[in-house]
Amino acid sequence: MISKTDPESIRGFLEDTSNLKSGHTPGVFFPETIAEIQELLKNAPREHRRFTIAGNGTGTTGGRIPFGDFVLSMQKLDAIGEPTVLSADRAIITVQGGAVLQDIQKKVQASGWLYPPDPTESLCFIGGTIANNSSGARTFKYGPTRNHIARLLVVLPEGELLEIRRGEMIADSNGEFHITLPGGMTKTIHLPHYRMPATSKHNAGYFSKAGMDLIDLFIGSEGTLGVIAEANLMLFPMPDSIISCLVYFPSMEELLGFVDACKKPANGLRPRALEFFDRNALTFLRKQYPEVPTAADGAVFLELEAAKEETDGTLDRLFVTIEASNGMEEESWIALDRSEQEKIREFRHALPLIVNEWLSRQKESKISTDMAVPDSAFRELFDFYRNSCERHGFVYIIFGHIGNSHVHLNILPRNREEFVEAKTLYRTFVAKAIALGGTLSAEHGIGKLKREYLADMYGEEAIREMAEVKKCLDPFLVLNIGNIIPDAFLEPDNH
Ligand SMILES: Cc1cc2nc3c(=O)[nH]c(=O)nc-3n(C[C@H](O)[C@H](O)[C@H](O)COP(=O)(O)OP(=O)(O)OC[C@H]3O[C@@H](n4cnc5c(N)ncnc54)[C@H](O)[C@@H]3O)c2cc1C
């Protein structure tokens, strides 16, 4: 097995997109087979080694950044099988944990299938997206990654291999899983008792629900319970046609009216994506796209799927809805063909790039939220974000997944004082979202950056229960220590 210890090879593994500093590691291992992962983990306690799993480093919460532990890179385990057709509207594909998402998407599209999860940055590894239960724009229609995983092959922290097929292992009425591993060892996992928030997206801490499937405990567990070595992904038929559209609105009231109308089933639009840009995000975008109208207070990007014979009817319904909501029809951008749709995609992707460029000139890191709330509370959280930032005189943008009442607020500090002020304000955002029945993280996960806030949402007893799940599967504390659960909760006397 290849391993590297020279600073040049290691450097890239000490970062992701979180800007979390001071990661360090004695070396990086590149297993080429699942058996090699097993061997590394089996020997770990004896060799006094811990491992942090590395996907492709596109995560935003420092989850893959090691603090003294070895790195287990998934780079070499990148095989992608062929789609197997199960029925006219269902297929499945087997992939290894290090397969790149965009390679999988290209492969399945070539045979007429769709793998819906699309967390914007398509260079991530599939194992990273499963470990983070990633979502993205299309989650509005298709749900997060969890909804599309039929089987997992997981290397547990003690090196045992666990195969889980959806539907085969369900929690019993005491909230327990009893697992017998291939080597004969048995484990009893007690599910935490907390109730997850009633948001349409949630990705903070272990998934826990009465009668849940064991596979859902591993999805979203951020590498703390095992290495996702292989997965079966569920595929949908590619829609006949896609309509992409960017609509500008003169006020937030009109924009929110449009979003509500699009969400109503009776409207018949059934968008697969409903995304938002506030006026400040549009100001940043105008630097590169001068055609963005200055009169716009915000914009909505939406994507619709239609069968060939339905395309004209869908377009008619879309125009009627835009007009009824007072959208700025003249300036709106409708794309029916691939190349024009690609241009809208580039427009959306330009925002983080322009913002990051601006930030690098200020030499500061952004403070960003990932909270979601129930639909009925969205306006209150949005106004709280906006009013707080205006009061402090911050440079900020709000954008993201408005269909799921999940928008990201990015505060862009111009100096250290503003950074410190924004960090303090962040805690009030967490408190507000929680008070509104929301979640601390809807999609980016907890990683190392947000674990101090998890107890604010669930309470300390819940974190202790999560720590017990972790210790049941990882008794020697070998894997991804520091993610989700604060270290103090893993200490032996913390019961
Ligand atoms: C510009 C941009 C936009 C984004 N937009 C979205 C979005 O809209 N929605 C969204 O959900 N996310 C979004 N993301 C983040 C996205 O979740 C991550 O990109 C992705 O999930 C992480 O994959 P990765 O391979 O890069 O993992 P890494 O960053 O390398 O690792 C992430 C975590 O997963 C663990 N991990 C990695 N591989 C495995 C494995 N095989 N087994 C177990 N654990 C593993 C790591 O230890 C770490 O804790 C965005 C990121 C960027 C940069």
Image (cartoon, grey):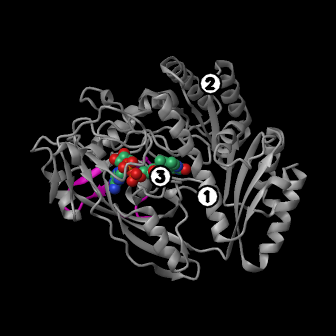
Three-letter code for the amino acid on which mark 3 is drawn: Asn
Label whose residue precedes the other's in the sequence (2 or 1): 1
Q: Closer to us: mark 3 or mark 1?
A: 1
Three-letter code for the amino acid on which mark 2 is drawn: Phe
Residue corresponding to mark 3: 133
> What kind of element bears circle 2?
loop
Taking 124 as reference, is 186 left or right?
left
Label 2 crowd (10 A; few <14 / some 14-19 / many >=20)? some
Quarter of the N terminus within the rendering: bottom left
Q: Is residue 171 magenta?
A: yes
Q: How many marks?
A: 3
Residue located farthest toward the left when viewing the structure as drawn: 46
Q: Could you tell me residue 197's position as x and y percent?
A: 58, 40
- Asked if residue 9 can be seen in this view, the reply is yes
Q: Give, as a single range, the part of the protein colored magenta.
A: 164-187
> What kind of element bears circle 1?
helix
Q: CA distance from mark 2 to mark 1?
A: 28 Å
Q: Quadrant of residue 231?
A: bottom left
Quarter of the C terminus within the rendering: top left
- Residue at 41 percent across and 60 percent down: it is 126
Q: Is ligand 1 less than 8 Å from the beta carbon at label 3? A: yes
Label 3 crowd (10 A; few <14 / some 14-19 / many >=20)? many
> What kind of element bears circle 3?
loop
Q: Closer to us: mark 3 or mark 2?
A: 2
Three-letter code for the amino acid on which mark 1 is drawn: Arg
Label 1 crowd (10 A; few <14 / some 14-19 / many >=20)? some
**Mark number for residue 345?**
1
Label whose residue precedes the other's in the sequence (3 or 2): 3
Residue corresponding to mark 2: 394
Q: Could you tell me residue 394's position as x and y percent?
A: 62, 24
Taking 83 as reference, is 136 left or right?
right
Label whose residue precedes the other's in the sequence (3 or 1): 3
